[in-house]
Image (cartoon, coloured by chain):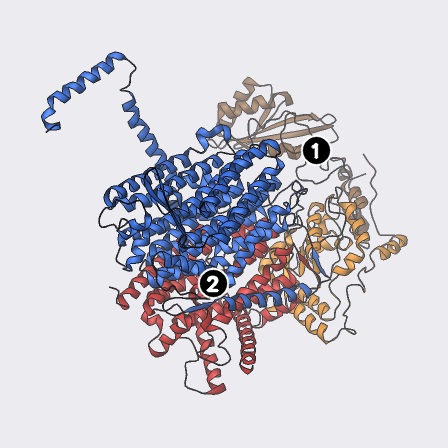
Chain colours: A orange, B red, C brown, D blue
Amino acid sequence: MSEIKTLGIPTPEEIKQAQIDFAPRCTSAGRVNDKETQGTVEYILNFARKHSLFVMAYGTGCGAIEIPATMTSRYDAERFGIRGAATPRQADVLLITGYLATKTLKRVIRVYEQMQDPKYVIAFGSCAINGGMYFDSYNTIKALDRYIPVDVYIAGCMPRPESVINGFVKLQELIKNGNAGNGEAYREDLDWYRKNQQKVIKNWDFPDKYNW
Amino acid sequence: MEGILFKILGAFLTAILAFVVGMFYGGLRRKVTARVQNRVGPPVHQNFLDLMKLQSKRTNIAHGFMGHLAPVWIIIAAITVLMFIPILHGDLWFNNLTMKGDLIFLLYMMVFGSLGMALGAGQTGNPNSAMGVSRGLAQLAGFEIPFMLSLIALMLQFKTTSISELMQVQESGSWIIVQNPFAFIAALLASLGMFRYSPFDIVGAPAELASGPRSEFGGKYLGTMMTGGAVFAFIKLVMYVDLFLGGAGNNNLEGIAGTALGLVELLVKTFLLYMIPVFIGLVSPRFRTEQAIQFFWKWPTFFGLLAIGWALYKNGTF
Amino acid sequence: MSKLKKENKILDKLNDVFDISGEVKRKLRIAVKIDSKNVSSILLFLKNQHGFIHLNHISCVDWIEEGEFELVYIVWNPKTKLTVLVHTRIDRNNPVMENIDTIWDQANTYEREFREMFGIEFPGLVGRKEFILEDWDDMPPMRKDFDTQKYAKENFATRPGREDAQDVREAIQKRSGEVIPDFAKKYSRD
Amino acid sequence: MEIIAIILLILLVGSILSFLINRVNKNFTGVTAFLVALASGVVFFTKVQSGYQFNFQLAGLDLQWGLTDYSYYFAYIIFGLSVLALLYSIKYMEGKARLGYYYASFLMTILGMLGVVVSQDFVSLFIFWEIMTWASFLLVIYNSYYKIKTKGIKYMIFSAIGAYAMLTAIVFIRVHYDTLLISEAIAKGAFNFEQYIYIPIFLLLGFGIKAAVMPFHVWAPSAYSKSPMPFTTIFSGAMSKMGIFGIGLVFTTFYLSNDPENFYWVRTILGWLGGITAVMGTIYALIQTDAKKLLAYSSVAQLGYIVVGLSTGTELGVMAALYLAVIHAVFKGALFMVAGAVEKQVGTTDMTKISGLIRKMPWTFFVALVSIIALAGVPPLGGFVGKWLLYEALITESNNYILVVVVFFSSTAAFMYSYRFLFGLFLGQEEKETEHIKEAPVTMIIPMVILAVIAMIAGSYPGLIFEPAAKAMEAIGFQNVSWQMSSLTNIWGDTTDLFLISMMIFAVFIIAFIFLTLKGLKKTRYVGTKDISTSGELPKEWENLTFQIDFFKPFERAAAPLYSMNMNKIWKNLGKNLEAFFGFFRKLYTGNGQTYALFVVIFLVVLLLFKDVIFS
């Protein structure tokens, strides 16, 4: 039998390293229009962006079942301008609903890269935050923001539709202040993301150049 | 010189009117849908926000030249048809090129946009797009038949192929909906297919075909398509009002008051007409393509033939 | 025993033909153990002679201490509603099992899964090697000696500060001061 | 020597010459043929005016060659298309076998067609008609030289039926009216349905087969698609118009009479046949997977429109037919050239095998796009004018209200195959195996582009075609045909201003195009066709996701009753029954002398028994 070392409470060195690794990577690059610097035009555009969120509901995990409830009569997300988009080309928000298997992660990355700037990611449920109940699973990623930038996390297992809407409202706030949307930062920091992605996805067959 | 200036200004006014009204109608449709489903729904101006957001997208992708041109064809079709349709009776501002084109031209011009869009969708290489186009074109062959029959009935009954003259006919007499009700029924049933709401929305079914022909368009392309679509919705409504509901602006007031009254009349008529496909769409499931085509070839075509018979009876051929 | 008449009848018939050790588990359910060489013949016998025309499921259990994989074929007779569980064991170090997808087509799916998840070879099995996992290059992950937590730690970035990313048993022990009883210790990881 | 004879002689000599030159040097054959056609065309248009006439005697028959405005109109189509097709041939046929055979037959076909339009008597008409048919038959079987028995047989049989029908009619005209000149026959009312109804019927049969009218259209799709593409260009573009030319001649009596009740049933039946031809051609075109076959069926459908136009017999209708004859030659010629270019560069025109050629062959795509828009009849290109004229003629001037719906259905369904053609060859996923493909050679591009430009100009200035068409109509019996340079008017006075429409479309195009291009220009990227949103899945290089097979299956299902009507099957059954019938007669010839002796005896006995009845 092989030797097993439990993770336990992280050591100070580990925490230090983690602080470097998990430092918010998308600080300034994508945010040309944060609250202080944005002009009138950007303010108006942000207003439009904020009130028109086309959601690419990528039903990755069990959380996908919360989306119909959020969208339909009872919780009616459409009153915030949130509506479904059929393809990543039309979408603004990528909703990761729950755990992400490595196999799915590959597709999610592709979908994310096919979306057009400014694009936002909402990750949904404990599994997307830290692995949740799949913390020791051999094929589920544990921290989504290592692979694609995330704007808003919604905690819970599962978050109820109220929390989902709360998450969207938080995202709207970020958009209004010009703090959301990390597409450009992602492109700038592509090497780091690619390194992480390729560590998980063994057979990397994406084109080398960033071409979408 | 002044005349030309007025023309250009009038054309701009018409385009802006069509755009604004079309967008608001889209928003109203969403609102009405929401209310029927017991929801609050988005604000009425939601479509403007969507359009603004789409146009403000920072990056865009195109799959090639035809893909790049796809929204252009829609805009061309929308603006051109708009210019050839009388919006108000003999109004200075909205009387663009209305006497220069007839119904056959309008009929063909109206498919121009969808065909161009289909070419753009084809170049993206997305199988869903091609599938949507295939369904759309097949459906076109369905609903154009009753629509054409209804138009032929009108042409025969009033001995004209010009839409302005058909309006003139209704100015003196009663509306065509009274004079030839069957033509109206056929055209109305055809309009359900033209609007592509349920039950004829299999062309761009979001879950099944990933929104069909539009699936590869985002950002400015999708936004421009939305604009064209909004103008087109307005055009169809105005066309139906002109053809069957007596047009608008047929009042005795002079100057700006007459125009304003005419516009209000137009809005009321188009809105009422618009609600028919919207409400039918709300309570309908979805037809498969062949069911849709067969539907159009049954009752609407029957009413169309009846309309032609009625027209021949009325104009004294037999 | 009179209650389980038809169960016993089937068991007797099987006993007549095959070298099995079987028992009637409960009403409508019979379990038999058989040597792995005879699995296909007993399945064919059940299917053709006694109307067990439906293959419910094939499951695999990793008996790591005994160095064996146990395969359980569950077949069902829609007329008599009887279920027969055919247990068989194969060597863990050289896991080769007879391919039965000629008897039931759907067995193919299960067998491909076992090939991927346990590394059991089925000679003559048709289908892509890659079934559910993508680009898997490690030990078959459902084997008990595959350490999934270690694999996860090595491959996936873990968010720091998550205290429950550890052995649950140990954590409970640490938190409550509870002592693990002796009978439970053999299930402990180390 | 008369100038027309010189032109025909140039073509004849050129035909032989190109055959001989091919023996010497294969590279010059095509150029020679092209120069011969060009020279004869130049001589024709510079030296020959309409109204030219030339009488001579041959074997005791009074023959007359000459040109009216009507035949001159068709000469435009013949020479225009032939010269371009021969220019196109030079590169297309490069490296192929039997070049001499090809070019000689090609020039003979031109000679035949020119002969048909210049003949003003029935004898030379028939002779040239046969030259044309035989020369074209040689080209139809060009690609299947060693399988003549199965390939060209349908064309041959139908041409033979047509020729016999024509010959019968000519003999009857000679018997009943004692003339062989067409003008005299018209003057004497030979084509009138009142007196000897079989004369015009037989003539219409003969011409209708060439024009691929409904029950006799079955030869057309296979013949069009099997010939070499440059020849199909004139086969479908010009030679089928000879049938139209003939139908127009037969109807001259009616046009002259100016009486809408005249010929009523014949015209109604012919019109309906044309309408059904259009529908059948269209619905069969849209289920084809071979681009050539698709175009061939589409040609049949378009010829149906022309027949409908001719049979309305009104001014607008005949104008529509003549206009469509030219514009069909233009866009269908271009489209067959496109198919040929694709065939030359890729090796196949099977749409299930190729896709995404747009960036490899941009000029070819441009031509295909323009011609397809013209074919579909969408404004502002030339095809729309023809459609407009046809509909207005049917609605305003004729009382075939249901026929207009049939025609309209056909042209709406035509959108489908139009799209199918463009999508199948040029759009869709770009494949790895077509990466090496280059644009077609420039001598193939030039004729295509010329035709496309004509189609574009005709959309704004259809008057350029109306002018000779109006003259041609006056030559066959209309008076004071009115036309405008760039606007269309029906008899109810409703106009469509084409120039304005073109300008409008052009202006909006420029504005929208500039807006779309300049907006976010730097951040707009081109992506390949493998970068599509297929639920996040990455399509492999070898995966072709283009949707090609059963493209219009839903329509097929909806229109299943229409598809169950198959003319081919009917003809095949007829052929089988005839074979059985004549097989019975063949059994009489047993090869046994005694049987023959018995026949002779029976014959004599019958003769003796009924001698009173027979020789009374």
Left or right position of D86 against A40 = left
Q: Is residue D190 left or right of residue D87?
A: left
Q: Is residue D240 above or below residue B239?
A: above
As drawn, the label of residue D463 is 2
Task: Provide the secondary structure element on which disc 2 rests.
Answer: helix
Nearest-to-viewer mark from 2 and 1: 2
- The C terminus of chain D, quarter of image: top left
Residue assigned mark 1:
C118
| Residue placed furthest toward the right | A13
Q: CA distance from mark 2 to mark 1?
A: 80 Å
Q: For mark 1, name the chain.
A: C
* Secondary-structure class at tag 1: loop
Residue at point 44%, 30% (across, down): D150
Q: Chain of mark 2?
A: D
Neighbourhood count class around disc 2 (C-alpha, 10 Å): few under 14, some 14–19, many 20 upward: some
Residue drawn 85% across and 52% down? A10
